[in-house]
Every structure is written in structure tokens, then in C-alpha cells.
Image (spheres, rainbow, N blue to C red):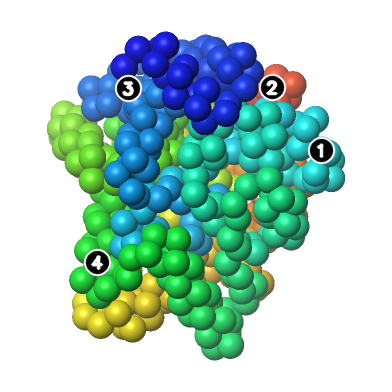
Amino acid sequence: MSETTYHEMWEKLNLDLPAHDALLAVLGKFYGDIYMSQQGRLKGMEYLDFVLSEVHGLRIKELQEAKAAGRKVVGAFCVFVPEELTLAANCVQVGLCAGAEAGTELAETLVPRNTCALIKSFIGFKLARICPYIESCDLIVGETTCDGKKKAYEAFSEIAPVYVMEVPQCKSDADRALWRSEIVKYKARIEELTGEAITADKLGQAIRLVNAKRRALNRLAALRAADPAPISGRDALLINQVSFYDDPVRFTTSVNALCDQMEERIAAREGVAAKGTPRLLLSGCPMAVPNWKLPFVVEGSGAVIVGEESCIGTRNTRDLVDETAETLDDMLEALTDRYLKIDCACFTPNAERQDNIIALARDLKADGVIHYALQFCQPYTHEAFKVEKALTRDGLPMLAIETDYGMQDVGQLKTRVEAFVEMLKA
Ligand code: SF4
Ligand code: SF4
């Protein structure tokens, strides 16, 4: 499809074309600098490069075609939104990215200035009319995770079709009952949107499909335990980012093909960095497209990233939904249990996250952990203290970073990361 035809499509979606063109130009340059400059990339990354180059083109065209065929598009900002139910109702689910600084001034007319960059980004993208995904959505599903998000959805619902799921803050039996009822309510809402009843057969298929995607991503994550590291952290992050908006079947096939190449590389004892290069685990807030700043800084400082303990990483893929359930009711139970295992910092207490970080760091043979939190993110900045204590007790060094989507602090970040990497080498 030609660029001109994409312009027609974007115009129909009511995008601000000059602002959108400017965003694509910046994104293209950023991608070139951060991704195409890497050495020794796996051949299978060409698929990811293609998907990203068509992020606002071909994939949006596919969404429009799905809509023309009667399917609905559902957007989500959080891994608590059960994709299995969305797919079982024959909808397409897309993760809305919110990883770039855009429309910040506009966003600050709806949410306070001391709000995290992710929230400002999704409000800014909508107000500036530069996101074809948001504009394609028939429904956007929010959640009451952190205070910033739940209040932001109140404002967002005035400008977009929003439905909010209530995520409990603890994990007692009463909280589980609440979450179970929220899953049932979401099922009813999505059935109302589509006019399609979710049957055990459809939900069972959707559970297996999403599990297959998670299994492929877990396979990729486990292969990163090899030294030399078979893939860069930047590429692995990109794969996890793309998992939220690509077609799930096509994506799973591509990731498994990439894993085959990684296995060949591991067998040949080859990698993207020399054996013995300091290995770091990133942990904390999710890094949405195109938030590649910290991985770029880390891998430009003599280290290699071997894992992401985040919702755009293993926090989203680690747990599978039990596939043995046969009735609709048992499947809803299985979904309830699986989603309540997510160890988001919004929960209190949340000790399992510390255990999970240590286990992941050990599995991936990480030499240290970089804890990443967005500025003004209360849940993750609070947990950084506890995570550091737990890691220190376990003999794992940690560096706490708080940043946003701006580029002003790149020099300062580089200095701190380089010092941390030097300390690991000593
Ligand atoms: S960190 Fe928490 S709020 Fe953010 S996407 Fe993950 S589960 Fe949702
Ligand atoms: S980064 Fe923190 S403050 Fe921002 S939406 Fe996520 S949990 Fe909330």
C-alpha cells in the first residue's frame, strides 16, 4: 500500500496529519539510531523491523479490514485486561503503547503535571490526534491499578470510549471474589459490544492461543540465560512490545522461528556480546514503544541486558492459564487465578515480586539489576527500596533509576550506568 493511501486512511481516522508525519519521522530516526546500528542481529529480527516500520501502516490497515468485516477493536493499557475474553468474542485486542513524549502540554490540561509519563503520553496521544490505534478502538479498557491511572481514566472517558475494570489492591479471598466478578462483568461487556456469546469452545481456543504466545516469549526469555547472550536486550524488548499489537498467530510463529535461530547461535557459542560481558536484568515499570532510552544507554555502556522483569517482559508471560478446564465457569476460574498472580507494584503487600526478581536474576545468570521507575510512579518508586534490600541480602547489586521519556538526562544516566557496570567488573 502506498504512503498516499495510508494518508487517506489516517485522514479518515481524523489524525492530525502534519503532527502525525512529524511523529513518524522522529520514530524512524530513533529506531535507526537505536536498532539498526546494532551488530550481529539475528536474521529473524527482520520481521520485527518490518512490523515496526509498518506500525502505523499495514497493521492499522489490517485493523480497518477487521472492522469492515464486523470485528471490534479493543485497546488496553495494562496486562490485567484478559485478552482471552476479548479474542473469544472475536475482537482484536491491541496494547496501546504510550511510550513517547507527545502532546504533554495538552495532557496537562486534563491531568496534573506530577503524573507519570505513561499516563501523560496516552492522554497526549489522544488529544494531539496522533495515534491511529486509539482512533481505531471501539472500546478502551482501563483498570484501577494505580491512583494515577484510575483518575486519568475518568478524564479519558470524556474523550474516548472507556470501560474500567476494578483490580483489587490485595489478594485475599474477598479480593479474589471481587476480581472474579470483574472478569464476569468484562465478559458481559464484551458480549454486549459484539453481540456474540462467549462459549466454552471459543474461550478454550482463545486460552490456548494466548498461552501459545506466552510460551514462545518464555522460550525466548529462557534462551537468554546463555553466555554469550544470543540476543540484545533492545531486540528482546522490541519483541515483547510488538507482542501487544501484532496478530497473535503470526507473531507466535515468528518468535518460535527466532528461538530456533537463537538455539543454533547458542550451540555455536556465538552471541551479541563477548562471553563474560556484564549481564543485567531490568526490573520495574513497563517500557512501552518507543521507550528504548534506558536499554540503549545500558547496552552502550559495556553491558548486555538479559531479561526484563516488567509487564512488557516476563511479568506478562510467566504464568499461563490452566488449559484443562472444560466448562465456561471453570475457565473463568482459571482466568481469575492466572491474572491474580501478576505481581504488579500496585498490590499490597507484594513480597512475591521480590522473590520473582531474585529467581529470574539467578535463572538468567544476571550480575546485577537495574530497577527502572518512571518519575511520579508511586508504586514502583516505593518498591525500589524493598527490592534493593532483598537483592542486597541475596548478594545481587542494584542500581535504582528514575526517569521519564525526555532525552535531557541521557548523559547523567550514562554516567551512573557506566559506574555501575565498572563496579560489576571489578
Ligand atoms: S505495571 Fe501494573 S498497572 Fe502497569 S501494566 Fe503492569 S500490571 Fe498494569
Ligand atoms: S508507571 Fe506507575 S504511575 Fe504510571 S501508570 Fe504505571 S503504575 Fe501508574
Circle 1 residue: 108
Q: Earlier in the sequence, mark 2 or mark 1?
A: 1
Front in this rendered view, residue 37 or 85:
85
Query: What amino acid type is highlighted by mark number 3?
Result: Phe
Query: What amino acid type is highlighted by mark number 2?
Result: Met
Q: Position of residue 254 (x, y in %)?
A: 22, 36
Mark 2 lies on a secondary structure that is loop
Instruction: Indicate whether 416 appears above or below 374.
Output: above
Circle 2 residue: 407
* Alpha carbon distance from label 4 to label 3: 31 Å
Circle 4 residue: 202
Front in this rendered view, residue 338 or 197:
197
Q: Nearer the viewer, mark 3 or mark 2?
A: 3
Circles 4 and 1 in contact, beta carbons < 8 Å: no
Left or right: where 47 falls relative to 377: left
Does the rendering let one see residue 283? no
Query: What amino acid type is highlighted by mark number 4?
Result: Lys
Left or right: where 148 falls relative to 399: right
Q: Position of residue 134 (x, y in %)?
A: 54, 40
Instruction: Indicate whether 105 appears above or below 310.
Output: above
Quadrant of the image occupied by residue 426: top right
Q: Residue at x 57, y 28 (%)?
A: 14
Q: Earlier in the sequence, mark 4 or mark 3?
A: 3
Q: Residue at x 65, y 64 (%)?
A: 144
Circle 3 residue: 50
Q: Earlier in the sequence, mark 4 or mark 1?
A: 1
